[in-house]
């Protein structure tokens, strides 16, 4: 049997073997109403009943403190036309910048939480904090989805990939979008 050729991957970049990952803009606010945006690729659904999702945020981030304080956040889904704003929100701290002002993104009232949604995003998941779990150098926040809604032009039961052009993080400062043929192979019996 022929031996498989592999490259050794450093453990500090091993998580990139799971990329590309959907990139989201999480919004949150402190008790005074000051809002912040953080770019995340570490997010995933974890339960359908109740509807839970998980996000992973380092404790040094301002958003981490805001979520701990208010126990809520919103996941906003950006498209490729917001890639510069998405990168800015991931590279700059809310302690030093008003990210809504700097990026010219529009905060709007959410339906069930005090944290704002981002008008320019195509979908939103409003969450109340269900659980907080320390995980190495990050914290996993489990959010119970209170409301979910999307632009009807790009999402019905699934995304229209041609219209939505969702952002996927490849690694570092590189992003891609899915521009591919959709394949639905028949199930074997």
Image: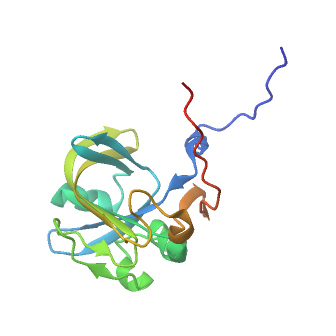
Q: Nearer the viewer, residue 7 or 24?
A: 24
Q: Position of residue 94 (x, y in %)?
A: 36, 71
Total count of labels: 0
Q: Is residue 105 left or right of residue 1?
A: left
135 above or below 181?
Answer: above
Q: Position of residue 146 (x, y in %)?
A: 19, 57
Q: Is residue 19 visible?
A: yes
Q: Which quarter of the rendered picture does the C terminus lie within?
A: top right
Q: Nearer the viewer, residue 164 or 107?
A: 164
Q: Is residue 169 left or right of residue 44?
A: right
Q: Residue at x 21, y 71 (%)?
A: 110
User: Image quarter for residue 120?
Assistant: bottom left
Q: Residue at x 54, y 63 (%)?
A: 161
Q: Is residue 98 visible?
A: no
133 above or below 153?
Answer: above
Q: Position of residue 102 (x, y in %)?
A: 42, 84
Q: Residue furthest front?
A: 189
Q: Which quarter of the rendered picture does the N terminus lie within?
A: top right
Q: Position of residue 4 (x, y in %)?
A: 79, 25
Q: Nearer the viewer, residue 176 or 138?
A: 176
Q: Residue at x 39, y 57 (%)?
A: 157
User: Image quarter for residue 162?
Assistant: bottom right
Q: Residue at x 17, y 65 (%)?
A: 113
């Amino acid at each position: 049997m022929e031996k498989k050729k592999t490259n050794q991957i450093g453990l500090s970049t091993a998580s990139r073997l799971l990329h590309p990952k959907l990139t989201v803009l999480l919004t949150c606010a402190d008790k005074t109403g000051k809002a912040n945006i953080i770019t995340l690729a570490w997010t995933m659904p974890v339960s359908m009943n109740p509807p839970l999702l998980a996000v992973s945020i380092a404790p040094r981030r301002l958003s981490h403190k805001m979520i701990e304080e208010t126990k809520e956040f919103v996941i906003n889904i950006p498209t490729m036309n917001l890639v510069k704003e998405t990168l800015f929100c991931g590279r700059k701290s809310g302690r030093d910048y008003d990210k809504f002002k700097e990026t010219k993104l529009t905060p709007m009232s959410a339906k069930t939480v005090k944290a704002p949604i981002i008008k320019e995003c195509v979908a939103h998941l409003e969450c109340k904090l269900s659980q907080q779990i320390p995980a190495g150098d990050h914290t996993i926040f489990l959010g119970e989805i209170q409301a979910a809604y999307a632009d009807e032009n790009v999402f019905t039961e699934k995304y229209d990939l041609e219209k939505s052009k969702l952002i996927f993080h490849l690694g570092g400062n590189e992003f891609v979008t899915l521009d591919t043929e959709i394949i639905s192979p028949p199930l074997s019996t």
